[in-house]
Amino acid sequence: MGRFRDSSADEGNEAGIDMSPMIDMVFILLIFFIVTTTFVEETGVEVDKPQAASSVHLEKNSILLALTASGDVVYGGKNIGVQGVQAVVRRMLQKDKGDELPVIVQADTAAASGLLVRVVDEAKLGGAKKVSVATSRAAGRG
């Protein structure tokens, strides 16, 4: 009877691949990417930005305000109005004590220029050292 072996008994003795170290490594990488990711805060409203040939990319950490064609000033998806700009800028600058956060105004092409000037003025009165107007790069320029 020794000549005939049961083949099902031998299958349990095969060597397998231990997946535990790979799973641990994936979790460590996942935690690393979650911790080091910076999230860009959007204004919460879509505006049609004017084009400019001299546009440049600004830093990611900034206070984003949107000025719509209807004259609404939006921050974080909420209409704060021109009167709320100064308070929002002051609060955000106090929260981020180390750096001087720039204020970026995303003004719609159809927004009134007088209202844009008022928003920029209110941001400077709130303590902002640097206020920029967001534009899209003009076609044909690199």
Image (cartoon, rainbow, N blue to C red):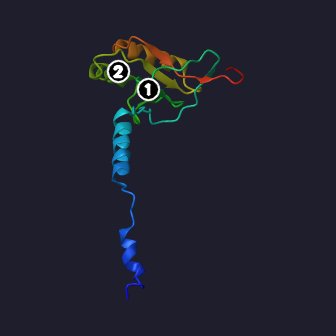
Where does label 1 land, which residue?
A: 65
User: Going by the image, does 109 lie left or right of 10?
Assistant: right
Q: Is residue 52 shown above or below 69?
A: above
- x, y percent for residue 29: 38, 41
* C-alpha gap between disc 1 and disc 2: 10 Å
Determine the residue positioned at 30% across, 21% down: 96
- x, y percent for residue 115: 49, 20
Of residues 118 and 45, the one drawn nearer to the viewer in this rendering: 45
Q: Is residue 120 shown above or below 60?
A: above
Of residues 97 and 33, the one drawn nearer to the viewer in this rendering: 33
Residue 89: mark in rendering:
2
Quarter of the figure with residue 41:
top left
Q: In the image as oriented, which residue stretches furthest toward the top?
A: 129
- x, y percent for residue 120: 44, 16
Element marked by disc 1: strand
Quarter of the figure with residue 136:
top right
| Quarter of the image where the N terminus is located | bottom left
Q: Earlier in the sequence, mark 1 or mark 2?
A: 1
Q: In the image as oriented, which residue stretches furthest toward the bottom?
A: 1
How many numbered tags mark residues here?
2
Element marked by disc 2: helix
The amino acid sitting under disc 1 is Leu
Determine the residue positioned at 37% across, 55% down: 19
Give the class, few, some or many, for how many residues have Cα within 10 Å of label 2's Cα (few <14, many ≥20).
Answer: many
The amino acid sitting under disc 2 is Val
